Amino acid sequence: MTLRFRESLPPLPRRRFLTDAGGGFGAMAASAWLAGERAAASHGRGLEGLHHPARVRRVIQLFMNGGASPMDTFDYKPALERHDGQMLGPKEKPEGFTAAAGAVMKSPFAFARHGESGRWVSSVFPHQAGIVDRLTFLMAMTSKSNVHGPASYMMNTGFTLPGFPCLGAWISYGLGSISDELPEFVVLPDPRGLPYNQKANFTAGFLPARHQGTVIDAAASEPVPDLFAGEAFGFARGQADRDTRDALQRLNRQHAAEYPADSRLEARLAAGELAARMQLSAPEAFDLASETRGTHAAYGLDRPETEDFGRRCLLARRLIERGTRFVQVWSGPQGAINNWDNHGNIQTELPPMAMSVDQPITALVKDLEARGLLADTLVIWSTEFGRTPFAQGSLGRDHNGGSFVTWLTGAGVKPGVAYGASDDLGYQAAEGTTSSYDLHATILHLLGIDHEQLTFRTAGIDRRLTDVHGHVIGEVLA
């Protein structure tokens, strides 16, 4: 339907325009509220989606920052042992490599088959090896870039350049919130630092600012800072706090009326209202002391190697359990150490990273399943690219966008199956090639969203998460 306005209509006075616009915003808010009520009511009776019935209601993404090596984790390559030490790589340094390709290097870690599916898993993941029959593998993921920044943008936003909304923001924009008490999109970064691209991986881009990720430092004594007035400001608590918040909201609304096109003002209003509600909900949600000693031990909170990532995995479960729709848990900061960017020595650098996440990830999957949450939750294990089968220096591995591994588990995917394969050395995807476009299209599909229809018009272009690419990976859908 096309609306045409008659040119003979008199212009609206500014005050009348703002009043009408305010009514429109109110109607939009009411519509969003009612949609949230419908979504909440649908829980347990089948899920509503934006374009078709959904299989998934909430998502947890586990992101291994730096480029996890596939041939040392999930992609067993016997040919690396046969050709170990041979110079079979490219003669000239490919774009994105940090050094010339060295000789073929076999994995220093033992592989074995596990589960009824017989999936190969390396010895660095003994816990995940026990749940392979629950996992769905994409064995031939590819990236357009071998460079951390662009590749990380690619896996998070679908573009190699900054300024585009990330997956979590698109999901928030398309589906809204499940609960009014917690943010719909939460990011739990590594406490040692933010990943490559910093907070740009969690951005709303050109979408309304309220859809950006809420970054929470789970290791801090106050994961949500400044939610309550400090001890030195006792006068600002109670009714004084409520009066101050109301006054700020009135000022923000007046300012928003002056600049209706600025989505940051809408985000500020929404954040203020959410912060007020979180004064009641957040302390309970972030209080892990209420969990049993057995749960703490299962997630590895009693061991220094696993305590941090385990804490964030457990917090992710508690958040989605209470109504957060999308939680992203990061392993590793940017930089040359303490992440999955194993240039120097794969034998010494990979095992501590793998150990830090292996038990917590396995506990998360088992915990979600035991609580019935996997029935409508999708868990994703991802990284920005893989690593070369050729040595860098003597024992390291360089960047490689040619092939890497992603796995999914939970609602809507076939457990215990694998799709795609890399070549004999694990250097390039050989069959069943997939990319971030296909992964994103599949995630949106499971959430009840057609990736080609979820668009936002900006700068004269109808933009979408998958750009002009992507297909739903039907081979892994249940």
Image (tube, rainbow, N blue to C red):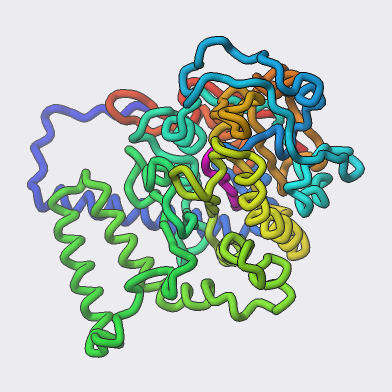
The quarter of the displayed image where residue 222 is located: bottom left
The quarter of the displayed image where residue 8 is located: top left
Q: Nearer the viewer, residue 301 or 224?
A: 301
Q: Nearer the viewer, residue 175 or 100?
A: 100
Query: Which segment is the magenta one?
Result: 57-66
Residue found at x 68% / y 26%: 140
**Is residue 64 a member of the stretch shown in magenta?**
yes
Residue found at x 35% / y 74%: 227
Vertical comparison of 36 with 461: above or below:
below
Vertical comparison of 281 with 231: above or below:
above
Residue found at x 26% / y 89%: 234
**Can residue 232 be seen by looking at this rendering?**
yes
Q: Nearer the viewer, residue 55 or 313?
A: 313
Extreme residue in the top direction = 91
**Can residue 438 be seen by looking at this rendering?**
no
Residue found at x 46% / y 18%: 95
**Is residue 45 a member of the stretch shown in magenta?**
no
Vertical comparison of 400 with 155: above or below:
above
Q: Where's residue 142, x and y in %?
A: 59, 25
Left or right of 147 in this view: 102: right
Q: Where's residue 405, x and y in %?
A: 67, 34
Image quadrant holding the N terminus, namely top left
Image quadrant holding the C terminus, namely top right
Left or right of 195 in this view: 226: left
Extreme residue in the right direction = 116
Q: Main secondary structure of the magenta part?
A: strand
Q: Nearer the viewer, residue 367 or 400?
A: 400
